[in-house]
Image: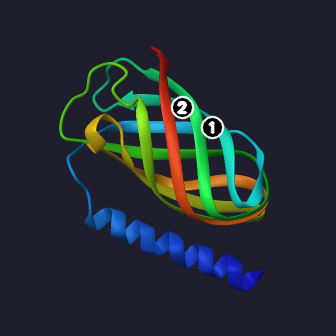
């Protein structure tokens, strides 16, 4: 188990370095999300997600809901978790502009309390980049690494 956790932490470090090198656009806000609890079924998982988007410099807060799916190794059970992403885009967006599908790499390891990260690209014409502001915090027992898909629906301001 210690080797698996170490491997997941190494993957997180590599993803963080890669995301810093690949920033596209300007930071326009922060997307904070609560991810529902669930069970990893060896080859993947699917969990509900509720998010709040806060634009930089004020502006109207937006609410999103959807589902986050992981494909790859995903073994274990997790409680609710929280993740925050910095949102990068080519410029300002219209209200509801984060809706759409995102995909990217993910890694996490949990033994009672754990960490994870997801670097995602998608949204309108794949122009929006979601990069972890801080690593995902969660509880449970779980190890996961692979590809993550996130579908967001605009649910109002």
Q: Position of residue 4 (x, y in %)?
A: 70, 80
Badge 1 marks a residue whose secondary structure is strand
Examine the rendering and report whether any part of residue 139 can be seen.
yes
What residue lies at 27% left-to-right and 67% top-to-bottom?
Answer: 21
Direction top: furthest residue: 157
Badge 2 marks a residue whose secondary structure is strand
Q: Earlier in the sequence, mark 2 or mark 1?
A: 1
Give the answer, above or below, for where 145 lies relative to 78.
Answer: below
Q: Which residue is mark 1?
A: 34
What residue lies at 49% left-to-right and 32% top-to-bottom?
Answer: 152
Give the answer, above or below, for where 72 lies relative to 26.
Answer: below
Mark 1 crowdedness (10 Å alpha carbons): few <14, some 14-19, many ≥20: some
Direction bottom: furthest residue: 3
What residue lies at 49% left-to-right and 22% top-to-bottom?
Answer: 63
Mark 2 crowdedness (10 Å alpha carbons): few <14, some 14-19, many ≥20: many
Q: Position of residue 156 (x, y in %)?
A: 47, 14
């Amino acid at each position: 188990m210690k080797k698996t956790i170490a491997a997941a932490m190494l993957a997180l470090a590599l993803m963080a370095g890669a995301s810093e090198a690949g920033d596209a656009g300007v930071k326009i806000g922060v997307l904070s999300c609560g991810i529902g609890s669930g069970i990893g079924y060896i080859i993947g998982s699917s969990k509900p997600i509720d998010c709040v988007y806060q634009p930089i410099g004020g502006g109207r807060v937006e609410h999103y809901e959807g589902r986050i799916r992981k494909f790859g190794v995903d073994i274990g059970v997790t409680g609710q978790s929280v993740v925050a992403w910095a949102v990068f885009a080519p410029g300002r967006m219209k209200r509801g502009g984060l809706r759409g599908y995102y995909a990217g790499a993910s890694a996490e390891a949990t033994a009672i309390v754990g960490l994870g990260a997801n670097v995602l690209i998608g949204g309108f014409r794949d122009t929006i980049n979601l990069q972890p502001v801080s690593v995902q915090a969660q509880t449970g027992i779980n190890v996961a690494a692979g590809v993550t898909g996130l579908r967001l629906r605009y649910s109002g301001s």
